[in-house]
């Protein structure tokens, strides 16, 4: 909420906003603190200077000229140094004395007047010192100039601090984007450095061509899109693709986050938007990239903050700047978001972000290419098979795959090995999906047995049902928040799932619940996450996917509920009678799945006991060993076939 819209009963004066107990020296009175410090330092330096000048003030004994003449005549003087009218005398016994001669008279003439013979004067070494004009004046003025220069220095230092604070206030409304120079080879990204996203690259190649050769488009009357909105899940490479466009076109790349526009003061975000676009226009052709634009681009009209809402003013300024572009300005605005559904309609209309590029999760071949890119600087062992890793990582984004390779290298380095082995890659898959192993989380004998039967129930039901994904690994070693897990992966990627596959997934999720109840006659808190997942899936089948025969082909709920004045609002758009029918259908689906899982576990109880016993002994069973146990108990394992695309992990 901006200061202008703060309720009166909540406003506080500047004095009331100050803490009751101020620290002795705060940012507000830093000038006074610096001034006192400067005075103390000046006082200290003055004392030091006085000490040395006092030490120099201890002059040798001053004698009269007549005494000097007598000593010269007696042969006691070794040398005399003449410095203007001052005489520095060194005797034969190394004694030092001083005297003064007559002004405007030579020393020899003065001594001759006092009766010193020429022979006696010839035995004395007389040195004449003549100072230049600037040395004389420096000697005279140095006691005054040194303190004066010191005061001037401290005044300049303090004024510089005050000026710096003032300059920060004047630069408050300036944008500070991160600029990537096209000639910086260290930060330059090309399309060859981005694996996958083939369709997105094709769309973005037109932007590169326009930035390199805009005349070709303008001559034929074509207008290049002013804004390109990159949409996709987190970690799919939206920012990387934007940098690749700038690298391919060889133009400056101005990157800024949407949250950097929003400040507590109204108008600052709009000022920063204006400044950013002015800088980009001066550097044209160039690219402006706004990451997480949904931070400022959400739908307006929510009534929150009124017309002076800072976020809305920032969005309005973005709309004005984009609509004011001319086709020949050669400034492209790119933005990224994983929430395109909440953006303001004016932001995505033709003329602004009129081209929307969807970046999907990589398929199997894309995952293999991405893994190869991230493996370039990592020494791999001979047993590494990237294709196997790509097969076991469906649903992974580009960022997940980069993290996978990094975790594998960390695991190898932790064990003091020089190469990354296939074993490290397989372990890193589970670490990225579930978290690190918690070996310290030791289960007692009873809990270990319950966990083993729970995971064995999931695996057994998944292996018997025809439309469930095949099981690749079962473990009762705690990872992350899970006490155990059953990892089931599809053989091939698919973009759609059928009703039969959903029903089998629900039955598989109930496998652990049914196994606990059948074997021990009791239920623990372990299946809580399974129940949440399968209930949500059953409700989606009824309300979103039209997979209920009773409710028919009707979508009763959308993504994230309905929208009111541009803001997300969870609510139902159907009557209480329909709501009761939905609950009854969800109950029916879950009950049928429960009965299906119960029949499988009852029929194959020997296989369940064998899997649970093996899990209790070794804690982890891989796919080959699991299939051996199934075959020994008369169950035929699944072969490669068309199954769902997303990996499923059932946690206990």
Image: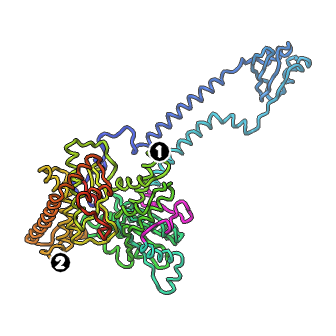
Q: How many marks?
A: 2
Compare residues 399 and 246 and report the one nearer the observer.
Answer: 399
Residue 536: mark: none
Give residue 553's mark.
2
Residue 35 screen position, x and y as percent: 47, 40
Return the mark for residue 416.
1
Spot occupied by residue 623 in the image (x, y as percentages of width and height):
32, 57
- Residue 473 visible to the viewer: yes
* Coordinates of residue 306 in the picture (x, y in percent): 26, 66
Circle 2: element type: loop
Q: Quadrant of residue 566?
A: bottom left
Tag 1, which secondary structure? loop
Q: Residue at x 29, y 69 (%)?
A: 643
| Of the pair 332 and 31, the residue shown nearer to us | 332
- Horizontal side, residue 292 vs residue 164: left or right: left
Q: Residues within 10 Å of mark 1 (few under 14, many from 20)?
A: few
Label whose residue precedes the other's in the sequence (2 or 1)? 1
Q: Residue furthest top?
A: 74
Q: Is residue 203 left or right of residue 82?
A: left
Q: Compared with residue 348, is residue 382 higher up or lower down, i.e. above or below?
A: above
* Residue drawn at x 22%, y 63% as measured from the top left: 464
Which residues are the magenta region?
Answer: 169-197
Identify whether 138 is placed above or below 492. Answer: above
Other residues around mark 2 within 10 Å, as few (<14) / some (14–19) / many (≥20): some
């Amino acid at each position: 909420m901006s200061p202008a819209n703060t309720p009166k009963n909540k406003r506080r004066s500047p004095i009331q906003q100050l803490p009751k107990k101020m620290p002795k020296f705060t940012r507000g009175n830093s000038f006074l603190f610096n001034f006192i410090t400067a005075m103390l330092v000046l006082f200290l330096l003055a004392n030091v200077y006085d000490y040395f000048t006092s030490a120099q003030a201890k002059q040798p004994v001053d004698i009269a000229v007549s005494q000097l003449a007598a000593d010269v005549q007696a042969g006691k003087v070794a040398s005399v140094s003449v410095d203007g009218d001052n005489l520095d005398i060194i005797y034969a016994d190394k004694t030092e004395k001083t005297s003064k001669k007559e002004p405007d008279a030579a020393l020899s003439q003065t001594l001759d007047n006092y009766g010193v013979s020429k022979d006696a004067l010839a035995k004395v070494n007389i040195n004449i010192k003549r100072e230049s004009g600037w040395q004389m004046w420096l000697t005279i003025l140095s006691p005054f100039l040194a303190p004066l220069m010191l005061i001037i220095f401290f005044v300049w230092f303090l004024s510089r601090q005050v000026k710096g604070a003032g300059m920060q206030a004047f630069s408050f409304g300036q944008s500070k984007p991160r600029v990537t120079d096209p000639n910086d080879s260290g930060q330059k990204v090309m399309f060859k450095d981005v694996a996958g996203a083939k369709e997105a690259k094709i769309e973005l190649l037109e932007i590169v061509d326009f930035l390199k050769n805009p005349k070709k488009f303008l001559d034929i009357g074509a207008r290049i899109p002013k804004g390109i909105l990159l949409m996709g899940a987190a970690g799919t490479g939206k920012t990387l693709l934007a940098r690749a466009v700038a690298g391919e076109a060889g133009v400056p790349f101005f990157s800024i986050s949407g949250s950097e526009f929003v400040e507590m003061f109204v108008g600052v975000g709009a000022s920063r938007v204006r400044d950013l676009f002015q800088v980009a226009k001066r550097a044209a052709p160039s690219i402006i990239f706004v990451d997480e634009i949904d931070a400022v681009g959400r739908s307006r009209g929510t009534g929150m903050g009124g017309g002076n809402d800072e976020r809305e003013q920032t969005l309005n300024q973005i709309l004005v700047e984009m609509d004011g572009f001319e086709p020949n300005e050669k400034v492209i605005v790119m933005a990224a978001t994983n929430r395109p559904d909440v953006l303001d309609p004016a932001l995505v209309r033709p003329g602004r972000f009129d081209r929307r590029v969807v970046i999907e999760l990589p398929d199997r071949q894309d995952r293999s290419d991405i893994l190869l890119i991230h493996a370039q600087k990592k020494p791999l062992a001979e047993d590494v098979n990237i294709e196997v890793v790509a097969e076991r990582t469906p649903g992974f984004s580009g960022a997940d795959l980069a993290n996978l390779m990094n975790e594998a290298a960390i695991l190898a380095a932790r064990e003091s090995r020089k190469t990354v082995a296939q074993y490290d890659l397989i372990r890193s898959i589970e670490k990225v999906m579930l978290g690190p192993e918690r070996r310290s989380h030791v289960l007692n004998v009873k809990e270990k047995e319950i966990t083993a039967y729970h995971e064995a129930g999931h695996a057994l039901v998944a292996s018997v049902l025809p439309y469930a994904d095949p099981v690749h690994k079962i473990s009762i070693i705690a990872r992350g928040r899970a006490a155990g897990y059953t990892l089931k992966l599809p053989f091939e990627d698919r973009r759609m799932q059928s009703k039969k596959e959903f029903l089998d997934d629900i039955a598989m999720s109930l496998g652990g619940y049914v196994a606990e109840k059948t074997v021990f006659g009791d239920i623990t808190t372990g299946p809580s996450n399974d129940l949440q997942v399968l209930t949500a899936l059953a409700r989606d089948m009824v309300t979103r996917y039209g997979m209920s025969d009773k409710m028919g082909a009707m979508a009763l709920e959308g993504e994230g509920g309905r929208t009111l004045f541009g803001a997300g609002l969870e609510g139902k758009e159907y009557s209480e009678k329909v709501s009761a029918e939905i609950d009854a259908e969800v109950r029916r689906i879950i009950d049928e799945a429960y009965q299906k899982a119960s029949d499988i576990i009852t029929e194959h109880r020997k296989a369940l006991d064998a899997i649970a016993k093996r899990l209790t002994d070794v804690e982890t069973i891989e796919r080959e060993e699991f299939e051996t146990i199934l075959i020994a108990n008369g169950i035929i394992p699944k072969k490669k076939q068309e199954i769902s695309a997303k990996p499923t992990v059932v946690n206990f």
